[in-house]
Image (cartoon, helix red, strand yellow):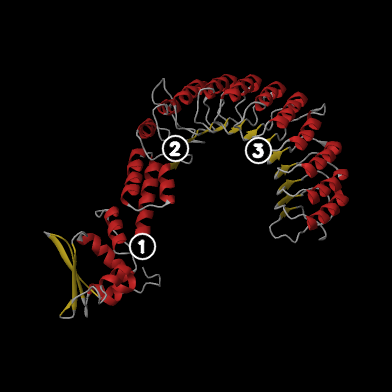
C-alpha cells in the first residue's frame, strides 16, 4: 500500500468518467460492477499494481475487466470508497471479518489495521460490560480469521479486569463459564475488584472462581490481590493441589492469616507447577512462616516468593532461613518488613553462605538488630557467590557495618544491585564505599540515599565515578555532600538532591 497522503477522488467515484477498469464483484444473484481508474487503483494498492500491469491485464476496447466473486458488493464498496477518498466507514450490516479478509487480499493494510482496532475495541467493550463469553468468542474469531501478531495473542489471552466492576451474579457466572472452557485465556487480573459479589447465599464469587480453577487447563497467571479472602485459604489450597497449569498466583493483601498460610503451604508441598507466589501483607505470622519453610524443603518448582509485611518475626525468619540451606530452586525472596531480629538475621546470613541459587533477596526494614544479625549479614556477602540483587535499606547498619560492607563489595563478584538507603552510614563510610566502587567491576545499581555521607564522602564518590565503568544507576539523594556529582559515562543515571556546584 502506498503510504503517501491520500488525495480524495470522491467525484470520480460518484461519476466515473474516463474509467479504464471494470471490476465485477459478488456471486449471483448479488453481483455488482464497479467502474474505476487504473492510475488510482495502482497508486493505492500493490495488489492492483500487479493485477493491472501489462503483464497480466488484457484490455478490450481500452477497458480492463476482471471478476472478484469472493468479495461481496457491500464489502467492495467500502474498500473502493477508501481507495478513492481515504476514508474508512462501514455499517454494522457488513461483517468486519469480511472487510478484513478482503482488505488483506487486495493489499489495503491500513484498513486491515483499522478493522482489527475496531474488533479489539468491541471485545474490550464486552469486557467492560461483563459480557465475558461474547468477548471470548470475538477474541477466538480474531485469532482464527485474521493473521495475528504477538500483540493480538497477548490481548486475547491476558484479561485485565481490575478496572471493571465484575460484581453481579450474571458477570461472575459468565466468568466461571469462560474458565470452564478450554480457551485462549492464560492470564486473569481481578485485583482491586472489590465487588465480586455473591452468586448465592452460601457461595461467594471468588470461591466459585477458585473452585473452577480445578477444572481449567489454560490459565497460567491469576491475580486476586486486594481481596478479603479470609477463610477461602482452604479453597485456594485445594485448587493448588489439583490445578496443573497455574504458574503465577498473586494474593497480596488478601487477609489469609496464619490458617490460610498453613493451608497454602501444605498445598505447595504437592503442587508441581507454580513458580511465582505473592503472599505479601497477609499477616501470616511466625506459624505461617514455619509452614512455608517446611514447604520449601519439599517444593521443587517455586522460584519467586514474596512474604513482605507478614509479621514473621525472628522465629518465622529463622525457619525460612534454614529452609534456604536445603532449597535449590528459589531464586527470588522478599522478606522485607518482617522484624527478623538478630536470630533471624544470623540464620539468613548462614543460609546465604550455603545457598547457591538465590539471586534476589529483599530484607528492607527487617530490623536485624545489632546482636550479630547485621554483622553476620555483611560477612555473608564475602562468601555468597549467587546473589545478584540485595536490598538492605532501612536496617540501621551504622558506620562500623557500613565499612565492613564496603570491604565486602571489594571482594564480591556477583552482586549487581545493592540498596543501602537509610542505614545511618555516616561520613566515615563515604570513602570506603567510594574505594569499593573503584575496585568492584560488576555492580550496576547502588542506592545510598539518606545516609549523611557528607562533603568528604561526596568528593570521594566523585573521584570514584571517574574510574568506575560499570555503574548505570546511583541514588545519592539527601546526603549533604555539598556538590553535584557528574560522570562522563552517558549510561550512568545519578539521582541527587539540588546542590550548589558541579564537581
Residue 61 higher or lower than 292, as above or below: below
Tell me the residue that label 2 is attached to: 165
Q: Earlier in the sequence, mark 3 or mark 2?
A: 2
Disc ID at residue 360: 3
**Secondary element type, mark 1:** helix
Q: How many marks?
A: 3
Within 10 Å of the Cα at label 3, are there few (<14), some (14-19), or many (20+) other Cα atoms? some
Q: Residue furthest left?
A: 29
Question: Residue 108 at x, y = what percent?
Answer: 33, 64
The CA distance from mark 3 to mark 2 is 36 Å
Residue at image position (58%, 34%) is: 303
Quarter of the image where one finds residue 197: top left
Tell me the residue that label 1 is attached to: 109
Q: Nearer the viewer, mark 3 or mark 2?
A: 3
Within 10 Å of the Cα at label 2, are there few (<14), some (14-19), or many (20+) other Cα atoms? some
Disc ID at residue 371: none
Q: Nearer the viewer, residue 332 or 455?
A: 332
Amino acid at each position: 500500500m502506498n503510504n503517501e497522503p491520500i488525495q480524495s477522488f470522491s467525484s470520480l467515484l460518484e461519476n466515473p468518467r474516463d474509467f479504464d477498469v471494470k471490476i465485477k464483484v459478488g456471486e449471483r444473484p448479488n453481483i455488482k460492477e464497479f467502474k474505476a481508474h487504473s492510475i488510482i487503483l495502482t497508486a493505492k494498492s500493490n495488489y492492483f499494481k500487479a493485477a493491472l500491469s501489462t503483464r497480466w491485464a488484457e484490455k478490450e476496447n481500452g477497458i480492463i475487466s476482471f471478476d472478484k466473486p469472493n468479495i461481496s458488493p457491500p464489502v467492495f464498496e467500502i474498500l473502493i470508497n477508501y481507495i478513492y477518498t481515504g476514508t474508512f466507514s462501514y455499517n454494522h450490516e457488513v461483517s468486519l471479518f469480511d472487510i478484513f479478509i478482503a482488505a488483506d487480499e487486495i493489499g489495503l493494510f491500513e484498513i486491515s489495521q483499522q478493522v482489527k482496532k475496531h474488533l479489539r475495541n468491541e471485545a474490550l467493550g464486552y469486557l467492560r460490560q461483563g459480557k465475558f463469553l461474547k468477548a471470548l468468542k470475538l477474541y477466538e474469531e480474531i485469532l482464527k480469521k485474521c493473521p495475528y501478531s504477538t500483540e493480538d495473542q497477548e490481548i486475547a489471552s491476558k484479561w485485565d479486569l481490575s478496572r471493571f466492576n465484575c460484581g453481579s451474579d450474571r458477570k461472575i457466572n459468565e466468568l466461571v463459564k469462560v474458565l470452564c472452557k478450554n480457551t485462549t485465556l492464560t492470564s486473569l487480573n481481578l485485583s482491586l475488584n472489590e465487588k465480586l459479589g455473591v452468586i448465592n447465599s452460601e457461595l461467594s464469587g471468588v470461591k466459585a472462581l477458585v473452585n473452577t480453577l480445578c477444572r481449567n487447563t489454560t490459565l497460567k497467571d491469576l491475580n486476586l490481590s486486594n481481596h478479603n479472602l479470609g477463610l477461602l485459604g482452604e479453597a485456594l489450597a485445594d485448587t493448588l493441589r489439583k490445578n496443573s497449569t497455574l504458574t503465577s498466583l498473586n494474593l497480596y493483601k488478601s487477609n489469609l492469616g496464619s490458617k490460610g498460610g498453613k493451608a497454602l503451604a501444605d498445598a505447595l508441598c504437592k503442587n508441581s507447577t507454580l513458580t511465582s507466589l505473592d503472599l505479601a501483607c497477609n499477616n501470616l505470622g511466625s506459624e505461617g512462616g514455619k509452614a512455608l519453610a517446611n514447604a520449601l524443603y519439599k517444593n521443587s518448582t517455586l522460584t519467586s516468593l514474596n512474604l513482605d509485611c507478614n509479621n514473621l518475626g525472628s522465629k518465622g525468619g529463622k525457619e525460612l532461613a534454614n529452609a534456604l540451606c536445603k532449597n535449590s530452586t528459589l531464586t527470588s525472596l522478599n522478606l522485607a518488613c518482617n522484624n527478623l531480629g538478630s536470630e533471624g538475621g544470623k540464620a539468613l546470613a548462614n543460609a546465604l553462605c550455603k545457598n547457591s541459587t538465590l539471586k534476589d533477596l529483599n530484607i528492607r526494614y527487617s530490623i536485624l538488630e545489632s546482636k550479630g544479625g547485621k554483622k553476620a549479614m555483611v560477612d555473608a556477602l564475602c562468601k555468597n557467590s549467587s546473589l545478584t540483587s540485595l536490598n538492605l535499606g532501612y536496617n540501621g547498619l551504622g558506620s562500623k557495618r557500613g565499612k565492613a560492607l564496603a570491604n565486602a563489595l571489594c571482594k564480591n563478584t556477583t552482586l549487581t544491585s545493592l540498596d543501602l538507603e537509610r542505614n545511618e552510614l555516616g561520613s566515615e563510610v563515604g570513602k570506603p564505599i567510594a574505594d569499593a566502587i573503584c575496585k568492584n567491576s560488576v555492580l550496576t545499581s547502588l542506592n545510598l540515599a539518606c545516609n549523611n555521607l557528607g562533603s568528604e564522602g561526596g568528593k570521594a564518590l566523585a573521584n570514584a565515578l571517574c574510574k568506575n565503568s560499570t555503574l548505570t544507576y546511583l541514588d545519592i539523594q539527601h546526603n549533604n555532600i555539598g556538590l553535584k556529582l557528574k560522570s562522563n559515562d552517558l549510561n550512568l543515571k545519578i539521582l541527587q538532591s539540588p546542590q550548589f556546584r558541579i564537581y
